[in-house]
Image: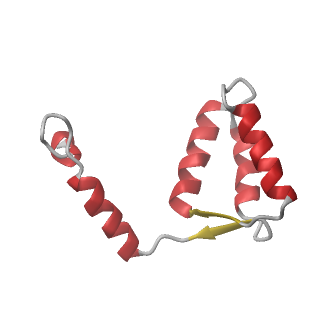
Amino acid sequence: MDRGDYYHSIAQSTYDDLLADEVLLVTTNWTGYEALSIVKSRIGYAQTLSLWEQLNDSETVRLVRITEEIELAGLDIFCDIETKHGASLIAQAL
């Protein structure tokens, strides 16, 4: 999507190979939303819509919705991460 990105050509080649091999891509709605946010801020709205259409193409992408259980487990892991100063990221944010 961003031809100026250092890794664009290898990413595009890998993506094309996966599609040619009919590999089902799997991601979560959280990862999809993060990608949409990055694409919108760096490339623009039109590319964001294109990515959204790709994410919702059930023949190529399986979009897994995060359950509350998975969300809470992820937040527990996130909160347990310590910085080099020994304080959790959440504690530093507060």
- Quarter of the image for residue 82 reads top left
Q: Residue at x 39, y 71 (%)?
A: 70
Q: Residue at x 83, y 64 (%)?
A: 22
Answer above or below: position of 75 versus 9.
below
**Position of the N terminus by quadrant:** top right
Residue 72 % position (x, y): 32, 69
Residue 46 in view: no
Task: Tell me the colour scheme of the image.
Answer: secondary structure
Q: Residue at x 61, y 47 (%)?
A: 36
In the rendered structure, the answer to whether residue 31 lies left or right of residue 24 reads left
Residue 59 in view: yes
In the displayed orientation, state which residue is furthest to the right: 20
In the displayed orientation, state which residue is furthest to the left: 86
Residue 80 % position (x, y): 21, 55
In the rendered structure, the answer to whether residue 89 lies left or right of residue 26 reads left
Q: Residue at x 28, y 59 (%)?
A: 77
Residue 76 % position (x, y): 26, 62
Considering depth in this image, is 28 or 37 the residue closer to the camera? Answer: 28
